[in-house]
Image: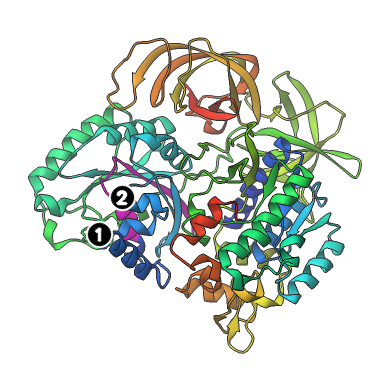
Amino acid sequence: MDHLDALESRSIYVIREAYSQYKNIGLLWSVGKDSTTLLWLCRKAFFGKIPFPVIHIDTSYKFPEMYKFRDEKALEWGLKLEVARNEKALAEGMCPEKGRLECCTALKTQALKDYIAEHKLKALLLGIRRDEHGIRAKERYFSPRNEDFKWNYKDQPPELWDQYKSRSEEEQHIRVHPLLHWTELDVWEYVKRENIPVTGLYFAKEGKRYRSIGCVPCCKPVDSTASSIDEIIEELKTTKTGERSGRAQDKETAYMMQKLRSLGYM
Amino acid sequence: MDDLRIVIVGHVDHGKSTLIGRLLYDTGSLPDGKMEEVRQASEELGRGFEYAYILDNLREEREQGITIDTAQIFFRTERRNYIIIDAPGHVEFVKNMITGASQAEAAVLIVDAGEGMQEQTRRHAYILGLLGIKQVVVAVNKIDLVGYSRERFDEVKSTLSAFLATVGVEPEHVIPVSAKSGDNVTSRSQKTGWYTGPTVIEALDAFKPLPKPVEKPMRLPIQDVYVVDGRRIFAGRVESGVIRQGDEVTVLPDPRKTKVKSVESYLKTKIEAEAGESTGITTTDKLFIERGHVLCSGTLPKVSTSFNAKVFWMGKEPLKNGEKVTLKLATQETGCRLEIHKKINSSTLEAIGGETLGNNEAAEALVTTDAPIVYEDFHTTPELGRFVLQKDNDIVAGGIIT
């Protein structure tokens, strides 16, 4: 087994543990490279057929390429695609100009809350990684959220030897993070090896590319000439720019990410 | 290049997060802007530059100057990729330290040159011994604050080494270090001319990744059963050995024999799966197999409803004598009770009395389970020799079978 095989096997183990404990589970698919990799691993874990819904939290501000990619792949891979939108907030004109914290909270966190409540989901699979952000470095594979959707980061459950927390009654749901141990470079090397499709936004055009994708108003491309997966891999081996440096919501104020995550942000 | 997971442990304020911050900085592993962010955060809180803030990202951690939760961070040297696990040194957060340490292949135990061995130094060392982490180096930190004194270093080294021997930890090196000023972390210090051993980074590079147990008898604990296109696939991770198409295997705990018809893999053809691999198999007959069953070949593991174990309790509520808890070992799960034979303070190692087993206490106990459990000795096959105990859906203890 090589490095990527080991990462893959560990993730599949976590995915299968999650499904064995919680039948009412969903996969959050942002259409980015990480959650698409997670989707790929789920297809492998269940031998082609993912037995739960794949949920896209749609703020309506995503890149057009992302919507196209989502619909094409959902059809091609036979996914049970569910699109969750906070229609009420959108109708009232919620947008980043009203404040990024407010916008992320209404269009992402609240949209997800509503979806979970409506479908009574007990667990969610998410493609976050420890190396993305200092706060995410402290996450568990199985991370409980309470009835108010809050992450109690000061009192997390112990995790030993691939034994994970079961749900207790007062908890709203468990967030499961099968990609926690991967790095950005690992993801790209795996995308290359497995031939996993990703949107064209990641590849450089006119000296710029997106390293992390989300909503159009809050994502800035980084300077780059990497126009293929091989070139991205080469770039990541030498770069000193942080992956989420183009993501505005991370740095609006100090501890913004901590605040967002403790309120239930992904 | 290989990967190595290293945990940094030791008493609160002895400099774990600072050492990691220094390692990341000196190896050029930090993204642009990180040093500036840390400088600003340090200033806002009225402190000098705090390397620890590189890892201590929670507001509460920075304000109080302590690490609350374990964090993992990645860096590389020319030799290999590292996953560094920072573990909190405060007595209140031992469960977070154990979470971090249980994922490590090697450890750095850090001790303050001035203060010497303290309560958590001893407890963390005991836990390293319990978890079976064999590759350990000791960093005697803040050597600058004792004037780079060889006498003080030797004193700390000898007291600590004597203690470590009692918990079965043999450090490969004891290194005089100043994480704050960078002495002997990634470059050799001019101020400790009397020290001839390796720097921290050289000592880390000399560690070895743990080999995958492919040579041992095959064990495949079943995680789940999926029906795909009418075929029943038994899914799980091979914990030791190799499973091949055509193999005769024994299903435990209630011994039955069957034969491997196929090794399944999506979009790939496979005929075998080895230790560490998540896989799925089908069998030639319609034997009933479910989660918790273990497929085995070669010498068979033990199957019993009672075994001796060492247990470390980390639940907020103590375990009452004879109280029922849930045991989870690989994918097996059953109710159990503990008969405590000996109870110790995990820092002083003194035997203690009392009917209950409380937070941070360790015990030697006889575990009696409701259903038969398939297990092995921790020191032979750790994957089937370790377990957790759960109470009200929370993990409250870790244990090893000896």
Q: Amino acid at mark 1?
A: Arg
Q: Residue at x 47, y 39 (%)?
A: A155
Residue B303 percent location from the top left of the image: 63, 18
Q: Residue furthest bottom?
A: A206
Numbered disc 1: what chain? B
The foreground one among B46 and B292 is B46
Query: How packed is label 2: few (under 14 Cα within 10 Å), some, or many (20 or more)?
Result: some
Q: Is residue B281 left or right of residue B21?
A: right
Question: CA gap, disc 1 to disc 2?
Answer: 10 Å
Disc marking residue B47 = 1
Q: Residue at x 71, y 33 (%)?
A: B222
Q: Residue at x 58, y 43 (%)?
A: A143
Which residue does the numbered mark 2 point to in the structure image? B65
The foreground one among A174 and B237 is A174
Res B165 quadrant in image: top left
Query: How packed is label 1: few (under 14 Cα within 10 Å), some, or many (20 or more)?
Result: few
Residue A133 visible in the displayed image: yes
Q: In this rendering, is residue B256 above or below A256?
A: above
Q: In this rendering, is residue A23 above or below A67?
A: above
Q: Which residues are magenta?
A: B1-23
Q: Are marks 1 and 2 in contact (CB under 8 Å)?
A: yes
Numbered disc 2: what chain? B
Q: Residue at x 35, y 70 (%)?
A: B36
Asked if residue B8 is among those painted magenta in the image, a careful observer would answer: yes
Whichever of callouts 1 and 2 sits on the residue coming sooner in the sequence is: 1
Residue A21 percent location from the top left of the image: 70, 35
Q: Is residue A186 left or right of residue B149?
A: right
Q: Amino acid at mark 2?
A: Gly
Res B35 quadrant in image: bottom left
- SS class, disc 1: loop
Residue A196 visible in the displayed image: no
